Image (cartoon, rainbow, N blue to C red):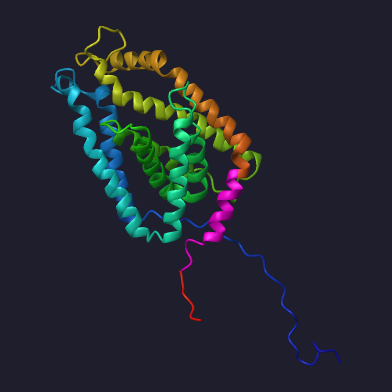
Amino acid sequence: MTPHDAGTPAPSRPRPVTVSQARPVRLGPRSLAALALVSAVGAAGFAWPLFADPGSQLGAHAQDAPWLFAGLLVLLVAVVTATISESGLGPKAVAMLGVLAATGAALRPMGAGTAGIEPMFFLLVLSGRVLGPGFGFVLGAVTMFASALLTGGVGPWLPFQMLAMGWFALGAGLLPGPDRLRGRGEAAVLAGYGFLASFAYGTVMNLAGWPFMSALASGIAFDPHAGLAANLTRFLAYCMATSLGWDLGRAVVTVVLTFVLGPAVLRALRRATRRAAFESPVTFEGP
């Protein structure tokens, strides 16, 4: 008689375990509502020149726009606070947020003002990809704020930069899940997203500054008395003439760094995320 026949339980075989990607910040109903509110106000702050009625008084107050919409900074802080409080952001996630934000802020001055060479963008794409849209939005806004303090770039344009960078990193977290896309396919998707988002970031930031050319005698300046079609043509010409080179440089650098450094950075971020175990409660054992 064998031990199994005698009633001894057979050794169990290990079952495959599916480990879901932990998210240090999960967007709940309150955070989503705050984010939607900020995004709506931000979209109005960016795009109002294109949709303002030519007969309205909005064009006469174009120079006041940065101060009127500087209140976005308060709303952004509210979004970050609501996200952190609702998700229960722990000390490990705060530490990772600080490290990544400091790294991004340090990368920005390396190429700022030089043909759009901004290596910070690729890091935010990869971080948003691994850590999720909630963490990506917070990281984008905090990184831009920290870099502005580092480079002396604090001004009425800062809320727009923070919101646009938050959108940029949040979008990376909404790409197809890592369980369905890995390896070269994932790198290609991230590079493509980074390329398009780099142009999108430059375009929306152009919208924030374009109305202030109204005093210049230029065919590409914002005309408060023109309609949507005429102003859209002027805006496209403004983007082509002023920022196309910077946006292209930013996009190319993002693509190159994603292909060259992306696999190693993704592995490091995923390894750090697994070891941090954000969703596991912290317990203290006695001696």
- State the image coordinates of residue 15 (x, y, percent, origin top left): 67, 69
Query: For this rendering, which residue is in front, 213 or 229?
Result: 213
| Residue stretch in magenta | 265-281
Q: Residue at x 14, y 19 (%)?
A: 60
Q: Quadrant of the N terminus?
A: bottom right
Q: Hey, which residue is sitting farthest right in the picture?
A: 1
Query: Taking the image as drawn, is residue 180 in sight?
Result: no
267 in the magenta segment: yes
- State the image coordinates of residue 54 (x, y, percent, origin top left): 18, 17
Q: Residue at x 30, y 26 (%)?
A: 208
Q: Is residue 244 left or right of residue 155?
A: right
Q: Is residue 253 left or right of residue 10?
A: left
91 in the magenta segment: no
Q: Quadrant of residue 112?
A: top left
Q: Residue at x 59, y 49 (%)?
A: 268
Residue 244 versus residue 103 in the image, above or below = above
Residue 165 versus residue 11 in the image, above or below = above
Query: For this rendering, which residue is in front, 21 or 5?
Result: 21
Query: Taking the image as drawn, is residue 176 in sight?
Result: yes
Query: For this rendering, which residue is in front, 227 or 194?
Result: 194
Residue 8 versus residue 217 in the image, above or below = below
- State the image coordinates of residue 253 (x, y, percent, origin top left): 54, 28
Q: Quadrant of residue 82?
A: bottom left
Q: Residue at x 58, y 36 (%)?
A: 258
Main secondary structure of the magenta stretch? helix
